[in-house]
Image: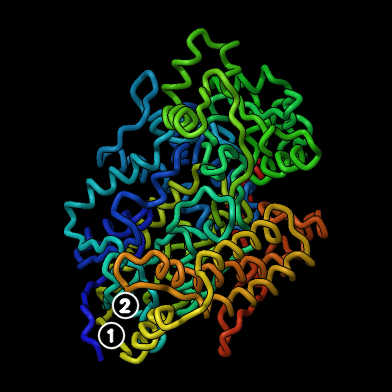
Amino acid sequence: MPDYETFEHDVLVIGAGGAGLRAAIEASVAGVRVGLVCKSLLGKAHTVMAEGGIAAALANVDERDNWKVHFADTMRGGQYVNQWRMAELHAKEAPDRVRELEAWGAVFDRTKDGRILQRHFGGHKYPRLAHVGDRTGLEMIRTLQDHGVHQGIDIYMEHTVLSLLKDGDRVVGAFGYERERGRFKIFRAKAVVLATGGIGRAYKITSNSWEYTGDGHALAYDAGADLIDMEFVQFHPTGMVWPPSVMGILVTEGVRGEGGILTNKEGRRFMFDAIPENYRAQTADNEEEGWRYCQGSKDARRPPELLTRDHVSRCIVREIKEGRGSPHGGVHLDISWIKQKLPHAAEHIKRKLPSMYHQFKQLADIDITEQPMEVGPTTHYIMGGVQVDADTQMSRVAGLFAAGECAAGINGANRLGGNSLSDLLVFGKRAGEFAAKFAKKNSLGKIDDGRFENVAREALAPFERRDAENPYQVQKDLQDTMQDLVGIVRNESEMREALEKIDGLKKRAERAAASGNREYNPGWHTALDLKNLLTVSEAIARAALERKESRGAQFRDDYPDKNEQFAKVNTMIAKAADGSMEVRLEPLPEMPDYLKRVIEENS
């Protein structure tokens, strides 16, 4: 048996984005030994691409805001299939997490009297997003890394985890490899925190970076944890559509928060055409009122461009399908029109949206202070993930915790913009805190040598195959399948077709080959990623089939309305004893009366 390099820690954190860093910091502060494994280089986590801000009821811009309003907004946005306890903790604790980040050195934009400035975002009743221009995620990662570097955390960059290791029913470590040299590594730990992000690379058009291959979801599923809400995939309304080389790259909701409007090829502001009844009282019915809202007027209602992301995405798709789209298959997002309202509009746009200005100038040769952008929906975020305890973030597998996008519960059927970054902070902290407590009560546990030997053998199998499948082609075909058949608008026949194709792609993935050797071999890495991508793709399709209704980010044209049968249930995915994927419906826990009153008072 090869003598693999082995590392020992009390808590092992997998993923170095906002949730992973915050968990590692909290566990280290608790006095335990912490290891942090990341797939890319430190500082390259996808959190840096989060632009708009951190949702927290600081009430710095509108004193009417508080945790109760934030909680009610989150539940309404999630169509009330959220885990209410997670939404409650998030709304209550987010302000402290933002102030903590500020104390650690985050340089937020400021109000005139020096407090943290907050901006409007879709689905939020009041301006709630603490931000750093449109580079908030980058500032968050910088701050957490600068603070975390002093905590004595061992960091393993450019490592991919292939499997979690168990002692009976408890997770006791992980087995992975160093991407640069291809050498296998064993990480022994008393507790493991998954913070691996999302699944966007299962789709053709996505705002997600290359790391987002559903690793944490698949690792937890294989280890015996449940996945919930996997049908709810959020398509952000505004990704770049031109040029093709940058299709899908995010265009922050902050553009609309600063007054940007959506128009079709006829120049008409189409979002006024379809305002949902439950948001009508809060939504402006004319351009002037919407503009006053973006300027901070407390007596104005929000513009329809700031409705929830699922609704805005469907409205954009409608315009495109009915022939009113922009030249390259999107719609127009225009911030330059505010020249009619502000005397120094160009300078204002460059100051408020510096990344967007440079992104379009460099990638599309468009000056957003003078010209509209072409945008369209892009796969952005998955509300589904590992089912965790709301307070501790531990899954049903002992010793296995999860936080951030790979965990689920807080967002329900649809996430509000900005809630992702405060989710990372609130539940990253909790995951690290309770993982450390678990580690102090448990030993390292025993590792089954045969388990990681099997994983190593499977990982090296692509080098033994000849005249086999190209892993890049298999991934491309999967992305096309998910984009075309399990996308923004779904129906039963197409999703069943997708599942048949996924079965075929699984067989092809088992024949995926890699040439050369283990060093510097991206083809091999792609072949290994296929298993996780296929697992999460199947989970999304099966959960979406089970939920026979349209709710939040799930829209089915064969069941276009909500169904009360599904109003208080989550879809649960588990791995059966025979290795097949099981789907079941599980009732939501009953919400306590005091939270029901909070929702009624803030509806």
Residue 365 percent coordinates (x, y): 50, 27
* Residue located at (73% from left, 35% from top): 325
**Residue sticking out furthest to the top:** 343
Q: Which of marks 2 and 1 is nearer the N terminus?
A: 2
Q: How is the image coloured?
A: rainbow
Identify residue for label 1.
445
The 10 Å Cα crowd at callout 2, few under 14, some 14 to 19, many 20 or more, is many
Q: Do the residues labelled 2 and 1 touch (CB within 8 Å)?
A: yes
* Residue located at (52% from left, 53% from top): 87
Q: Report how far apart the C-alphas of labels 2 and 1 lie in the structure.
A: 9 Å
Q: In front of the other: label 2 or label 1? A: 2
Identify residue for label 2.
173
Residue 206 percent coordinates (x, y): 55, 50
Residue 40 visible? The answer is: yes
Residue 316 percent coordinates (x, y): 70, 39
Horizontally, residue 177 falls left or right of residue 531, namely left
Q: Circle 1 sits in a helix, a strand or a loop, which is it?
A: loop
